[in-house]
Image: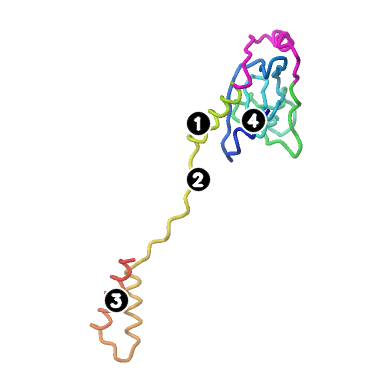
Amino acid sequence: MLTLSLLLGAAAGVNALAGGGVTGVNVTNGVHVCIDGCHYNGVFFSGAGYYCPIEEAVHVVLEDGTDDASPPYQCAEEELPVGFTERQLHDGEKPLECQTPTSVNRCVVYENQRGRKQNIIQWSEVVEELKKAKAQAAQSSPEKPSAAPEKPVDCGAEGSKAFQKCQQEKDASFDKCNQRGIEAIEACRQK
């Protein structure tokens, strides 16, 4: 089975957030994923039931930077709890792998203890929703700034330079230098 990272590809600066309230995922017959701030096959599942590519998971910390959040991870686009901020994951840091029981009922029991309603989706839905979210985020993100436009040439300055250069010649007349200045301006405008 391909990981989600291979399916989505990398798009720098574009975050894909999907789901919300999901409590479990049916991967295949006999394999289920219980969702609780963990990752499975390239996808991070937050405690609130959102999911995103694992590369977009962030560590939730207090505003002073200390670890005190439970659960400690969430997707980058999720709303932060009051008094908390997020930081990128450090080298090698990542959430735990999700439990994959053979019965989805194991996930349901845990979620019922937390007071959440059962919302189990298929793995194919996860992949499709993340593809859609990535595409929408890419469309709504501002384009990279274009290179600075070339500085416009000051044709008047070009004409002035030609006139002054002509004035330094021994046999230069005003009319002759004026004509060279005009020609320089016209040549500049043709560029």
On the image, the x and y values in percent for residue 15 come to: 58, 33
Specify which label sits upstream in the sequence, 4 or 3: 4
Mark 1 secondary-structure assignment: helix
Q: Nearer the viewer, residue 109 or 185?
A: 109
Disc 3: which residue: 181
On the image, the x and y values in percent for residue 96 come to: 76, 26
- Identify which amino acid the numbered label 1 is placed on: Gln
- Identify which amino acid the numbered label 4 is placed on: Leu
Q: Quadrant of residue 56?
A: top right
Mark 3 secondary-structure assignment: helix
Name the residue at the left extreme: 175
User: In the drawing, what numbered circle is on residue 136?
Assistant: 1
Start-end of magenta stretch: 99-124
Disc 2: which residue: 144
On the image, the x and y values in percent for residue 23 come to: 66, 15
Q: Nearer the viewer, residue 113 or 67?
A: 113
Specify which label sits upstream in the sequence, 1 or 4: 4
Discs 4/3, front: 4
Discs 4/2, front: 4
Measure the C-alpha gap from mark 2 to mark 1.
Answer: 16 Å
Specify which label sits upstream in the sequence, 4 or 2: 4
- Identify which amino acid the numbered label 2 is placed on: Lys
Residue at coordinates 69% horizontally, 8% vertically from top-left? 112
Q: Quadrant of the C terminus?
A: bottom left
Specify which label sits upstream in the sequence, 3 or 2: 2
* Mark 2 crowdedness (10 Å alpha carbons): few <14, some 14-19, many ≥20: few
